[in-house]
Amino acid sequence: MRSSPLLTLLATLAASTAFAQDDAPSLDGVGRISIQGGWRYVSNSTLYNSYYSQPGNAGLERAAKSPGGPLLVGSFAYAMSDLVEVGIDLFGTGERLQLTDQPQLTTLCYGALLGVRLQKWVALGPEGTVPFVGVLTGPLLATATFKGERPQETLTQAYAATVGATARLNPHWGLSLEFRQVFARGTVSKTGQRFSSFNAGGSWLSVGVSYAFPPDPGPSLRNPF
């Protein structure tokens, strides 16, 4: 049976903790900025099923589902210890949907996710690799706009799980890869017609660059004084 990427990464973190190398660099007090671009995929099956199941739409041919849309994320984080990193992810994403006999629907989602990541340095690559897993939550503003109509905005709370890794090219710069599964919904409305909500979360895959700042000599979980 094939194991999931999350279980594989958890096993890697556990193994690296149990067999830590003496020359492993400390992550305690390290600050990080990551800029990532990628793609957001979401099926929006609830929206499509609700629309085509309405009495007046039962005979309509279903339009092709959206392939998703672009994603931009900026992460600002600080390692409170060798294992725990806290941070905030600022993001923006969007997509265009097409329902039969309806004008084009554009959705935009942006906001901030605050969270905690568990991380560990492993001896892989030029300056090592830092795999991580985490949980995030925060405000998300979802906007849905039919062409020619006023936008409908929904402010909601988003929840996400994340898994990824940063391959260090040198002590400061690295390449990052991250997958986030985000849960949030927005409202779709149009004058004189009823629609279901749309999925403002989905599967987010992004790649980018990371810059690590030197360790902060101030208080930490390991040495609070």
Image (cartoon, helix red, strand yellow):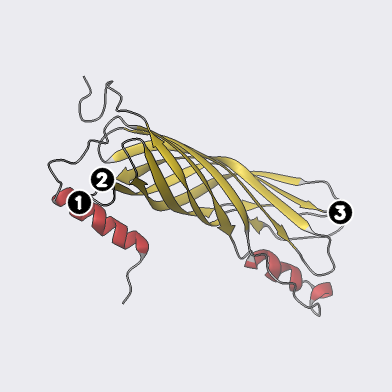
What number is the disc on residue 191? 3
Q: Is residue 192 left or right of residue 216?
A: right
What is the three-letter code of the residue carrying label 3?
Thr
Nearer-N-terminus badge (3/2) = 2
Question: What residue is shown at x 36% (from left), y 62% (from top)?
Answer: 5
Give the structural element (helix, strand or loop) at label 2: loop
Give the structural element (helix, strand or loop) at label 1: helix
* Distance CA(mark 3)–CA(mark 2): 54 Å
Single out the residue that lies furthest toward the bottom.
59
What number is the disc on residue 16? 1
Work out which quarter of the rendered image holds the N terminus and state it: bottom left
Q: Is residue 20 left or right of residue 5?
A: left
Residue 69 visible in the snapshot: yes
Residue 140 visible in the snapshot: no
Nearest to the eye among marks 3 and 2: give it: 2
- Work out whether residue 124 or residue 34 is closer to the camera in this orientation and state it: 124
- Work out whether residue 103 or residue 50 is closer to the camera in this orientation and state it: 103
Nearer-N-terminus badge (1/3) = 1
* Distance CA(mark 1)–CA(mark 3): 57 Å
In terms of image quadrants, where is residue 24? top left
- The picture places residue 194, in percent across and down from the top left corner, at 79, 60
- The picture places residue 158, in percent across and down from the top left corner, at 54, 47
Q: Are marks 2 and 1 in contact (CB under 8 Å)?
A: yes
What number is the disc on residue 121? 2
- The picture places residue 152, in percent across and down from the top left corner, at 75, 47
What is the three-letter code of the residue carrying label 1?
Ser
Q: Are marks 3 and 2 in contact (CB under 8 Å)?
A: no
Circle 3: is it few (<14), some (14-19), or many (20+) Cα within 10 Å? few
